[in-house]
Image (cartoon, grey):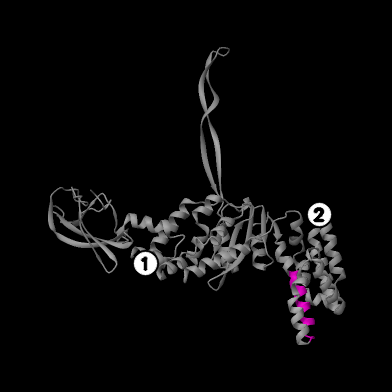
């Protein structure tokens, strides 16, 4: 009985030393000719012992100890060993071990896989690089109609993230958001004319990219970035008023800050009573709160025209005090008014990038030292998330049949009922909700599970 399961290796004996299973094997395939000159005049030239890592056996990392014969060609003097079709000579392990590592590499840390299979972290990283190259060739993401651009902070630096806003998927993750790096990337962007909407925050670099590479697209400023400016203005005013209070009142205002920030329609009766008391006591705070509420009311507009009227009314009612604290919002409406108001024509947002921020940071934390390239691959090449973000197109293949046309006295081909369907997959990227669900279920956090299991 072949318990090893490898077609070209025959097990001889086995032993366990230091928690590693060693299996002594003999090659079963013999060379029939020289790989250089194809001569069949071969001569035995000794035997060498070589070791290759294999998939874990009975919960232990395993090593195959191969007693490999060498052969010399009598014609061209080439020296070569027994063929080992089950072995990856480059990685010094079996091919099935590489497949085993690749099946776990997207949801486990390199260190946990290294402990399980006995390979070094460097070897796991090389297998990962090969895996990513394969995935890049396999999955070709469709250019988004609605392209979202934002940034996430990973490994101490801000990175640029591209999303398909329409399909709610991650399109790509770039190592930098610097304008020179963005220009280099977008100079080779595939099918830029397919991008109809460019959703972004108000960062100048993104506006420059939109103008240079997507001049035909509608640029839409993300409404949630703009609305955050309103709450920031309210917070700025609250902090200034708070500085003038004694310790007791400062603590009370700190606890009630969420009442000031929450929209009036979402307040409970008790919170409305507290708010009324607070605003009556601090008139300047009331000015800031009314300014914030009118600013938020802009987003209730039913049309672009109504929004323009609301913006003009809001700017007109600002005074010296509120302009100081809401200067960020005032500046945005002054410099990027058109991009902001485009939202009312094309209501798209990058709201879900907050989930991407949390996901990227969690993967980075659980990896304990992952490089940016690893975090990127774990985010955009998760097969479950890609499958959720895939469109399957099915089309019937018409079958043709020769029909005799008696009127024209000729045979002609006529299509009739389809015989079979053809299937085409359109990949849009990694589905963001699927990635977040996996994070919530702890499927990325195998490093913590491994430590708990070892302690038990």
Q: In this figure, which residue is indicated by the disc labeled 1?
A: 115
Under circle 1, the secondary element is helix
Q: Looking at the image, can residue 104 be seen?
A: yes
Foreground: disc 2 or disc 1? 1
Task: Please provide percent x and percent y for residue 255.
Answer: 73, 77
Residue drawn 73% across the image and 66% down it: 226
Classified by dominant secondary structure, the portion drawn in magenta counts as: helix
**Residue in front for this viewpoint, 3 or 143:** 3
Q: Which residues are magenta?
A: 229-245
Q: Is residue 233 one of those drawn in magenta? A: yes
Label 2 neighbour load within 10 Å: few <14, some 14-19, many 20+: few
Residue 377, placed above or below residue 244 = above
Alpha-carbon distance for marks 2 and 1? 60 Å
Left or right of 48? Residue 436 is right
Q: Quadrant of the C terminus?
A: bottom left
Residue drawn 47% across the image and 71% down it: 368
């Amino acid at each position: 009985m072949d318990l090893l399961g490898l077609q070209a290796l025959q097990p001889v004996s086995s032993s366990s030393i230091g928690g590693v299973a060693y299996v002594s094997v003999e090659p079963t395939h013999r060379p029939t000719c020289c790989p250089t000159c194809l001569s069949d005049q071969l001569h035995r030239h000794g035997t060498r012992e070589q070791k290759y890592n294999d998939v874990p056996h009975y919960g232990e990392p395993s090593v195959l100890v191969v007693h490999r014969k060498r052969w010399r060609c009598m014609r061209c003097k080439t020296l070569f060993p027994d063929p080992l079709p089950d072995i990856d000579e480059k990685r010094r392990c079996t091919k099935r071990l590489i497949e085993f590592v690749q099946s776990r590499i997207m949801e486990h840390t390199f260190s946990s896989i290294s402990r399980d299979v006995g390979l070094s972290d460097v070897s796991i990283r090389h297998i990962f690089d090969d895996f990513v190259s394969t995935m890049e060739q396999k999955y070709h993401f469709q250019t988004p109609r609605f392209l979202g651009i934002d940034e996430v902070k990973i490994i101490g630096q801000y990175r640029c993230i591209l999303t398909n806003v329409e399909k709610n998927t991650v399109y790509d993750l770039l190592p930098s958001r610097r304008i020179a790096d963005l220009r280099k990337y977008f100079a080779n962007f595939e099918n830029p004319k397919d991008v109809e909407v460019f959703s972004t925050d108000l960062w100048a670099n993104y506006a420059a990219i939109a103008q240079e590479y997507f001049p035909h697209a509608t640029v839409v400023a993300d409404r949630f970035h703009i609305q955050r400016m309103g709450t920031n203005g309210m917070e700025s005013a609250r902090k200034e008023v708070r500085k003038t209070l004694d310790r007791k009142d400062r603590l009370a205002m700190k606890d009630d800050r969420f009442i000031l920030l929450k929209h009036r329609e979402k307040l409970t009766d008790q919170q409305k009573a507290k708010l009324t008391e607070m605003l009556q006591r601090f008139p300047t705070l009331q000015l800031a709160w009314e300014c914030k509420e009118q600013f938020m009311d802009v987003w209730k507009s039913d049309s672009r025209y109504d929004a323009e009227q609301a913006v003009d009314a809001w700017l007109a009612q600002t005074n010296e005090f509120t302009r100081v604290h809401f200067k960020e919002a005032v500046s945005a409406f002054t410099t990027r008014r058109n991009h902001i108001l485009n939202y009312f024509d094309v209501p798209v947002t990058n709201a879900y990038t907050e989930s991407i921020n949390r996901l990227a940071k969690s993967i980075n934390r659980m990896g304990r030292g992952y490089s940016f390239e690893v975090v990127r691959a774990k985010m955009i090449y998760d097969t479950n998330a890609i499958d959720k973000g895939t469109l399957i197109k099915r089309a019937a293949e018409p079958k043709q049949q020769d029909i005799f046309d008696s009127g024209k006295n000729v045979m002609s081909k006529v299509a009739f009922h389809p015989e079979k369907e053809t299937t085409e997959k359109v990949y849009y990227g990694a589905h963001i909700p699927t990635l977040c669900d996996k994070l919530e279920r702890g499927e990325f956090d195998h490093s913590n599970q491994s430590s708990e299991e070892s302690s038990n």
